[in-house]
Image (cartoon, helix red, strand yellow):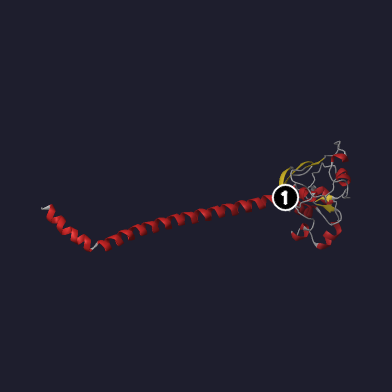
Amino acid sequence: MDYKNLSDSLVPLIRQNLLPLILGFLGVILLGYGVIGLLVSSSNSNDIAFEKASQSSEVNSGNKKDSQIVVDIEGAVVSPGVYNLPKESRVKDVLVAARGLSSGADRNWVAKNLNLALKVTDGIKIYIPFEGETFTSSQVQGGASIQSGGLININTASDKELDTLSGIGPATASKIIQGRPYQTIDDLLSKKIVGSSVFDKIKDKITIY
């Protein structure tokens, strides 16, 4: 093939179509930039959405932690241990979480020295002494403000102890034990353990801590 003749024939053809070729080339370049820009924008949007979701999760987690405190209760309680409780909890709420005083608790000491209305702080430890333990009131935060000695704890009392209550026989005592734990003494009514007439007789003689 005569390359000179081929060249001579192509040059006029290229000259005639130069503008369309240039425009087409520029169009391909612009299209490429557009696709790349779209991909980068999509990637940035996903990164921003993920970052916002992560920040939201961290904020929610932080709020949940800020609304709770951790309290350690040991000694003469039914379930000693460390509990997560709402921030505004009081000593009474800690005792409820620990299912109340055990049968060996020094209830006279509790009545004289433990302030059930005291707000607890994060990281505090509460110790309930057993009967016979040497434990001075100066070791206790909050001071004395309650008079609950002599009450029967419906969360820990034996069937014989429950049987001493007016209107409570062996069958009802067994129902009380089976219905544990109780958050308030009114749970005896809501759980249909006793009727209102019996409850009125015993409500001033029972406790849940």
Q: Nearer the viewer, residue 55 or 103?
A: 55
* Circle 1 residue: 85
Q: Please tell me which residue is depicted at 85% across the width and 60% down the height of the picture.
A: 200
Residue at 44% x, 54% y is 40
* Residue 29 location, quadrant: bottom left
SS of the residue under disc 1 = strand
Q: What residue occupies the far left of the structure in this picture?
A: 1
Percent x, y for residue 17?
Answer: 23, 63
Residue 13 x/y as whole percent: 19, 61
Can residue 209 be seen in this snapshot? no
Q: Tally the numbered discs.
A: 1
Q: Residue at x 81, y 54 (%)?
A: 169
Q: Amino acid at mark 1?
A: Leu
| Residue closer to the observer: 193 or 128 | 128
| 200 is higher (above) or lower (below) than 54 | below
The residue positioned farthest toward the top in the image shown: 134
166 vs 28, nearest the viewer: 28
Residue 2 in view in this figure? yes
Question: Residue 80 vs residue 53: left or right?
Answer: right
Q: Would you call the spot at circle 1 few (<14 residues within 10 Å), some (14-19), or many (20 or more)?
A: some
| Residue 174 point in image, percent of width and height | 76, 52
- State which quadrant residue 38 falls in: bottom left
Comparing 63 with 81, the one in front is 63
Q: Is residue 21 left or right of residue 155?
A: left
